[in-house]
Image (tube, rainbow, N blue to C red):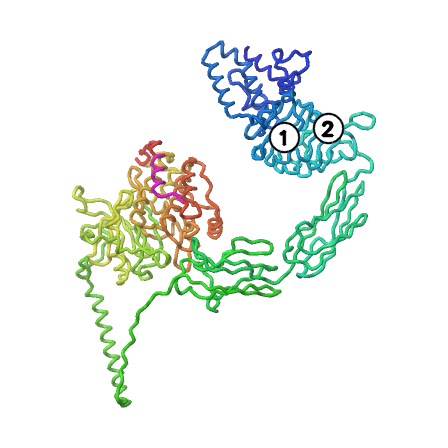
Amino acid sequence: MDTNEAAMLLRDSDGSCVYHTVASKYRPHDTVLDNRDMMKTDLQFSRSHCAPPRFFSPSNMCTFQHEEQTPTTAWILCWEVWWDITGPAMDSSAGEYGMARLGLFLVFFTGLWRFSDACPASCTCSISRIVCIDSEPGIEDFPMLTLDDMENITEIFIANQNRLFDINDNSLRHYINLRNLTVTRTRLTSISPDAFFNNTRLQYVNLRHNNLSILSWRTFQNFNTTLPLLLFGNPLDCICENLWIKLRLQEEGDGQELRCTDDRGETTPFATLTPPDCVVPIVDVTPKMVTKMQGSNVKAVCTATGSPPPEILWNLDILSTHHEIEPKETESTLTLSGLSPDDNGRVIICSAENMVGQMEATIHLNILFAPTIQQLLEPEQNHHWCIPFSVTGNPKPELQWYHRNVTLQEQDYIHTQIHLSTENEDHGCLQLVNPTHIHNGVYRLVAKNEYGWDEKKVFAQFIDPPEIETDEPPTYTTTSPLPPLDDSVAVYVVVGIAGVALTGCVLMVIILKYGRNSKFGIKGSSSVISNDDDSASPLHHVSNGNNTPSSSEMGPDAVIIGMTKIPVIENPQYFRNTGSMLKSDTFVQHIKRHNIVLKRELGEGAFGKVFLAECYNLTPDQEKIHVAVKTLKEASESGRADFYREAELLTNLQHEHIVTFYGVCVESDPLIMVFEYMKHGDLNKFLRSHGPDAVLMADGQHSILVELTQSQMLHIAQQIAAGMVYLASQHFVHRDLATRNCLVGENLMVKIGDFGMSRDVYSSDYYRVGGHTMLPIRWMPPESIMYRRFTTESDVWSLGVVLWEIFTYGKQPWYQLSNNEVIECITQGRVLQRPRTCPKEVYDLMLGCWQREPYMRLNIKEIHSMLQSLAKASPVYLDILG
């Protein structure tokens, strides 16, 4: 059989895509269809499901009418067609094709299984489908399987059943997950009004070619008009009971050309059906909104018109308020006595229905009542401490907490959270983050609205108060009182004390200015470093560090990471004992002042300036190397103490992906730190300059487009992850991980390091809080934004944002939103969308970093390992940097 002949087998004479023209093997044109051939006549196959690739060209493939709900039978017949058409060709051409075909056939059918006892002989039952197409012995009703099996069925296909006459209330009662139903070419005559009452998930109903003459609108009242309902081929009557079909067709607009038969036996289009005395009900109710106090009485009237006269019904099943109904011919009166708060927000439905259809009108209840605190429980400890409560009231009451009878001022670490809010109730808790003994005591909740108030109390014990031993001071007694001083003597005494104090202050200032010394061996003042070479050319490197509070504003427990001082006091629940990290034999290298030659200022921050410099005799194998020099602007004692502590700490931070710290120069002011110089500057600028639209000037020649590849991005990402693994192993929390705080060297070497320079370049990346504190909220997880909690897990979140930056070539996260909108998005659980160039595996990593609960986020070592695997699978070509 050649290609054209095979293709013709899928086309009928009228061009329709049916299967009964598979000609002589299945039936002569002058014989009666057998059961399977009748089934094949009605099936239309999918392009992607039933097109043998060796023979069927795309233009001749069929399209199944409802592709996303292809019945199992279509698959069975599809395999049969393929077998019969292609079998001889494949078997004659090569034996291996026949074996491959047989293998595929067997694999397909291993997914089907038969319920030996419950499934009727005329049917095939699988886990989710039932197909009944054999007329002998046939079925009289839908198969009754076990309850669990029926609940798992999502698709039923029934055809050629001469003994199936009706679908009653019990036929499909237990098929609660049924989505697709096809009953075709049977003797189906009637369907009960509640036949599909339990089948709320139905999406597709095909009842073509049956014996249905009358259908009630009630049968399909829960079936959305936008979903397919196929009725073609039924002898429908042109009567009032079927007028709803015309109205549905007008809403669907899918082009079903249904016809009905009138009293004279003539068929007419449903579109022209206009039975006499047949009008859809019209209903109205007054009032439509009821706003009354609790305990009030209300009377509502529902009126309806239509033909035949409609029946008026009220839906009052869930109403708590006492009610009475007074029905009349064209209206019905509802009286509500003593409105109950439980009915606030309820909707009462008045419906009018006749054989043509149903219409509804509604009454909304807005019942006003004073607040009631239903419960106030003792504190519970989950992620944080929580005092649970439930409050009712309409309007919603204002809540005020009191601690030990003092108004409680809510803030980040103690505030009210509403977990569930309904029309009547608010369920929430007073959340306390790491409370101490000072938070123990009685808590009182007051709920108040314009109609009244309520209060409740609860005692909270979070932590036992510390046991402080105090010795009573000794008591001194004298046998007689001392005589009072003479006034002149008192004046001399006061003047003398003041003179001594002034002299002491002067001496202290002199000592502080000229007698300072430290373990770094400062021996006095000398000239400041001068710029020996102003002609040095500007460099690519533009660092942008943190505008953190100056050293004078920070306590001695400030955590120092990279080049950034971070005051731990902003994060009171996590403390960093920097002393514990310092080795007892920590040795900070001292660099001579004359060995440092400044070249160019790179920037300035709160601490001082950063310069590009040449440093001589720093390494034994090089006479001089380029370095980055950080100076200390502030000369106070606290500033110097921070400087020494940072130097010791950085000496212990040694890793290939952390910017190298070489040492200090403390011979005179200003104090200096010397760091490794990274040639290509900060990673954010580097990414932007190597994006799809970036242009690099090469040696003054023509512009050359240079774009980072996916493999190079992975190489960058896994290096940053390696640095973060190291910091985590040292129990360090970075708190400001971003591409702007990573530096790029030669051969695409990336290191974590921030020189703390001015944030002018990246000011939009930070959110100013309290005048001087700058928070990188676009890189922060919810717990850091809301509670200032910074942990290794919060660094994992930031690492996910860094990955997003890399794969967007340095775009600002949430660039389309303001800072306040970003805070709202992050705290509400929204995450950044997948970048266009980002592989799915990397975006899955990002999502693993952005889990709302910190304990659910990926481990930093797992992230590094996965990035390493992805990077190894895609080798990096490093010549991008020249």
- Identify the image quadrant of the N terminus: top right
| Quadrant of the image containing the C terminus | top left
Examine the structure image and report whether residue 193 is included in the region drawn in magenta. no
Residue toward you, 501 or 125:
125
Main SS class of the magenta portion in the image = helix
Q: Which amino acid does the dot numbered 1 rest on?
A: Leu
**Magenta region: which residues?**
857-869
Q: Is residue 701 depicted above or below 13 in this figure?
A: below
The image shows residue 190 at horizontal and vertical percentages of 72, 31
Q: Is residue 822 left or right of residue 680?
A: right
The foreground one among 90 and 336 is 336
Asked whether residue 860 is in view, the answer is yes
Which dot marks residue 181? 1
SS assignment at label 2: loop
Can you identify the residue that label 2 sits on?
189
Q: What label sits on residue 565 in the rendered view? A: none
Label 2 sits on what residue type? Answer: Thr
Q: CA distance from mark 1 to mark 2?
A: 17 Å
> Based on the displayed image, in which of its 4 quarters is residue 160 positioned?
top right
Q: Which structural element holds mark 1?
A: strand
